[in-house]
Image (cartoon, rainbow, N blue to C red):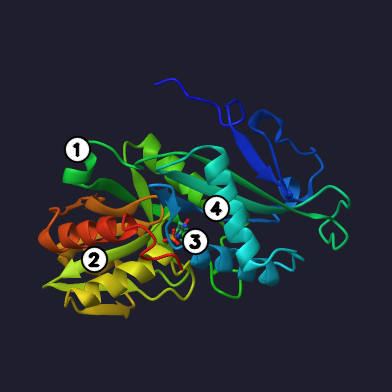
Amino acid sequence: MALVPYDDRDGFIWLDGKLVPWRDAKFHFLSHSLHYASAIFEGMRCYNGCIFKLTAHSRRLIDGCKIMDMNFPYTVEQVNAACMEAVKANNISDGYIRPLVWRGAQQMGVAAPQANIHFGIAAWDWPQYYKGDILDKGIRVTTSQWRRPAPDTAPVHVKASGLYMICTISKQAAEAKGYNDALMLDYRGYVAELTSANFFMVKDGVLHTPMADCFLNGITRQTVIGLAQDLGIDVQERVILPDELATADECFATGTAAEVTPIGSIDHIAYAVGPVTRKIREAYGTLARTPKAEAA
Ligand code: PMP
């Protein structure tokens, strides 16, 4: 399949308060973020032109800027409005929205308090992350050699670009071996998450998910926990040891892009796409597509 390069497309990118033609959204080689990964991003999805959980994503971005010592000048309402502007300018109905905050090129070196803080937003059509029968069979996952860092090693609750370095090499290594994604353990050896999605397993009708104490407490994860409780499914947030994976009945991943994605296998352990996964996947799909039902 031919790749359509992301820097060579029609449309507009919202850049520091203005809509600029897609191909003109360029920045300098000496931008601090390119060298030191001082950037934070978001990943949002819109359904029928309406961004699901928009305010929650905008808040996470702004909270992340504070932790990363970035003087971000926009309010939640302004971020919301800018994201909607990017969606409208590109005429997106079902798509993905990628806001990014980054340090500019005014200063070079590890500390760069005088560097300008830039903000850009791209939006593009992206109806589904996984397509076809993969959703009937579930994705194939292998355990990564890389682990999620401890909360005193990295700003683990921020969607910070630097934290994705180990996700990229983990997912690329998994794909090279014929898998769809990698499962990452944490620094203690507990089950943590996938490279861009949270992890759930079903055992005897109960939903289990690792405590989000050293990785992103995903907005989808929180939504799914609420939906499961509404459906009368017991949810346990707890430590999950890798040995327990062999005892699970069903497993799935959650994320804004992945939505609720069934997992068909982890290394040599196979799972059926079972009734709890199907029920939650359907409930999530319905909620996300209910116009304005969940704006926050
Ligand atoms: N963990 C990681 C590493 C991610 O990149 C994502 C996607 N943002 C998630 C979890 C799920 O987060 P959310 O449900 O907020 O998209």
Task: Determine which residue is flagged by label 3.
Answer: 54
Task: Determine which residue is flagged by label 4.
Answer: 164
The residue positioned 28% from the left and 38% from the top of the image is 131
User: Mark 2 or mark 3, which has the lower sequence index?
Assistant: 3
> Given the image, on which type of amino acid does mark 4 rest?
Tyr
Task: Determine which residue is flagged by label 1.
Answer: 133
Judge whether residue 6 can be spotted in this image: yes
Task: Determine which residue is flagged by label 2.
Answer: 201
> Given the image, on which type of amino acid does mark 2 rest?
Met
The residue positioned 45% from the left and 70% from the top of the image is 217
> Looking at the picture, how far across and down is residue 293, in whole percent?
35, 65
**Disc 1 beta carbon < 8 A from ligand 1?**
no
Give the class, few, some or many, for how many residues have Cα within 10 Å of label 4's Cα (few <14, many ≥20): some
Give the class, few, some or many, for how many residues have Cα within 10 Å of label 2's Cα (few <14, many ≥20): many
- CA gap between label 4 and label 2 equals 24 Å
Asked if marks 1 and 2 touch (Cβ < 8 Å), the reply is no
- CA gap between label 2 and label 3 equals 27 Å
Tell me: residue 213, above or below residue 140.
below
Query: In the visual, does 217 lie left or right of 63?
Result: left
Residue placed most toward the observer, 191 or 67: 67
> Looking at the picture, how far across and down is residue 195, in whole percent?
43, 53
Q: SS at mark 4?
A: helix
User: Mark 1 or mark 4, which has the lower sequence index?
Assistant: 1
**Res 223 → quadrant:** bottom left
**Disc 3 beta carbon < 8 A from ligand 1?**
no
Asked if marks 4 and 3 touch (Cβ < 8 Å), the reply is no
- Which label sits in the foreground, 1 or 3? 3
User: Mark 1 or mark 2, which has the lower sequence index?
Assistant: 1
> Given the image, on which type of amino acid does mark 1 rest?
Asp
Residue placed most toward the observer, 47 or 270: 47
